[in-house]
Image (cartoon, helix red, strand yellow):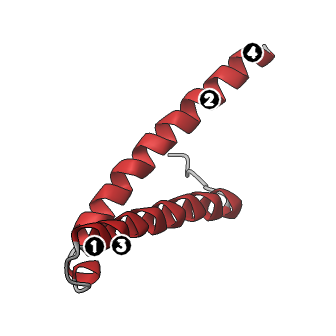
Amino acid sequence: MKNIVIPYTALKTELKWFVSIWIFSNLLNVFAILFYNTQWIELITYQPLIIFISVLLYLVASLVRLIIYGIKKRRSH
């Protein structure tokens, strides 16, 4: 069986994408807290939901990146 090796640079790139999406999700949460004038403890208590939303947004972003990669690859041939 052949081992799959993922380069460090690819892991670093994907981690940067996920962290930036997680930060964006937290900023949306801060906006909602300010807009609805709720308690700041929600930044902590809603973290499981924020992580879930971050994973969903990461999957959508990955799908878009994959489609763009496929289009570029097809045009080069």
- Closer to the chain start, of discs 2 and 1, is 1
Viewer-side residue, 40 vs 62: 40
Q: Which mark is residue 75?
A: 4
Foreground mark, 3 or 4, reads 3
Vertical position of residue 70 compared to residue 14: above or below = above
- Closer to the chain start, of discs 1 and 4, is 1
Q: Residue furthest bottom?
A: 41
Residue, x 67% and y 64% (percent of image)? 8
Q: Quadrant of residue 52?
A: bottom left
Q: Residues within 10 Å of mark 1 (few under 14, many from 20)?
A: some
Viewer-side residue, 76 vs 24: 24
Could you tell me the amino acid type at mark 4? Arg
For mark 2, give the secondary structure: helix
- Closer to the chain start, of discs 2 and 3, is 3
- Closer to the chain start, of discs 4 and 2, is 2
In three-dimensional space, the C-alpha distance between marks 3 and 4, rounded to whole angstroms, equals 42 Å
For mark 1, give the secondary structure: helix
Could you tell me the amino acid type at mark 3? Val
Assess whether mark 1 and mark 2 are in contact (beta carbons under 8 angstroms): no
Vertical position of residue 46 compared to residue 6: above or below = below
- Closer to the chain start, of discs 3 and 4, is 3
Q: Which residue is mark 3?
A: 30
Q: Which residue is mark 2?
A: 68
- Quadrant position of the C terminus in the picture: top right
Q: Quadrant of residue 55?
A: bottom left
Q: Which residue is mark 1?
A: 33
In the rendered image, residue 34, in percent from the top left (x then y), is placed at 31, 73
Q: Indicate left or right for 77 with 37 as reference.
A: right
Could you tell me the amino acid type at mark 2? Ile
In the rendered image, residue 5, in percent from the top left (x then y), is placed at 61, 55
